[in-house]
Amino acid sequence: MNLRPVRLALDVMGGDHGPAEVCKGALLAARDLPHGSKIVLVGDASAMGRLETASRPEGVELEITHTADVIGPNDRPSDAFRKKPNASVALAAKLVKDGKADAFVSIGNTGAAMAAALLHLQRVPGIDRPAITAAIPTLTRPTVMLDMGANVDCEPHQLAEFAVMGLVYCKTVLGRENPSVALLSNGSEDCKGNSLTRRAHRLLAECLPEFIGNIEAREVFYGKADVVVCDGFDGNVMLKCAEGVAMLVLSVMKEELTRHPWMRLALLPLRPAMRRIGERLDYRAFGGAPLLGVNGVCVIGHGSSDALAVSNALRVASASVGHALIDAIREAAQDLRKRRAAL
């Protein structure tokens, strides 16, 4: 648990539910942030006007940085930042660059958040490309998986960098001892996979003692590895497939279990168990996806994030700052370079 006061910049203009819901998430997170912390709400002040008189938790300051510029889902980030340098996500990232915030959180527009982070924060020395990180629910405990969509094409050394960053995140933010890392492939044997996977397997085996080999997609959900690495194409496809299967299973269960009135009565004793199942699979509990590899803490929330998901994304950012995640990644990246140079 982080007890150090943090300053978090929150881009409130993204997300499917609008700025009001994002601001509710900020108020919710403020209850649990360390005393003396600050949340800077970046966006159109007219959409946040009610916050001026809202009941705010004591000990955490809420500040508004106004801008009416927004990068929409149909805007190309590379062009949008030239036309809208004061867009909310850009200002949130710039607050971190200028030392006025310790981390920034953006909801919804992944491409814009990535572009803003790279533009204003740049990369950690020793990291070639940043990676989107997700917590995947498993039978044991969440597995950290990256990359989930930032880089559709990768080289073996980049997957090794992803592995190092994932291990650091597990150790520092999640507090796990001796975490393991596996490589996503179409088989557990060393010879399986495409050219990238086979070359990455050799490099990971030579550089990282935490490497336990290949892992199939279905095995990820059994919690066989603390960290799973892959390129952004495979990671994004797997993530969306998992989301679709989860929605399918829940929909079929609901349809079948409510088909007859007597089934509804039979479900009453199962409600506590069903609630616990929902809590274990609820994406909102995991907050946002850290963008690892940029030289500052950046957390990207799901577009459908409600107040609870936003608050947990802010908690992820706070924990990352409190555990000095970026410093740890910087040190691990340099160590990886030395190991590779010694091969």
Image: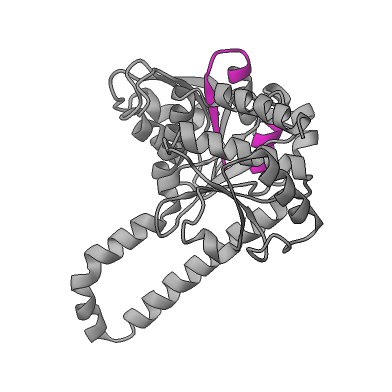
From the viewer's perspective, tell me whether residue 231 is left or right of residue 171.
right
Any part of residue 314 in sight? yes
Estimate the x, y position of residue 9 in percent, counting from the top left: 52, 25
Location of residue 331 by image quarter: top right
What's the residue at 45%, 33% (across, down)? Answer: 314
Q: Is residue 152 above or below residue 49?
A: below
Q: Which residues are magenta?
A: 96-116
Q: Could you say where residue 81 lies in the image, as x and y percent from the top left?
A: 75, 29
Residue 59 figure quarter: top left
Residue 104 within the magenta-colored segment of the rendering: yes
- Can you see residue 68? no
Q: Residue furthest top?
A: 99
Q: The C terminus is located in which quarter?
A: top right
Viewer-proximal residue, 326 or 9? 326
* Residue in the picture at 73% in, 49% down: 202
326 displayed left or right of 73: left
Instruction: From the viewer's side, name the closer residue of 200 and 321.
Output: 200
Q: Residue at x 39, y 79 (%)?
A: 255
User: Which residue is at 42% across, 33% downward?
Assistant: 315
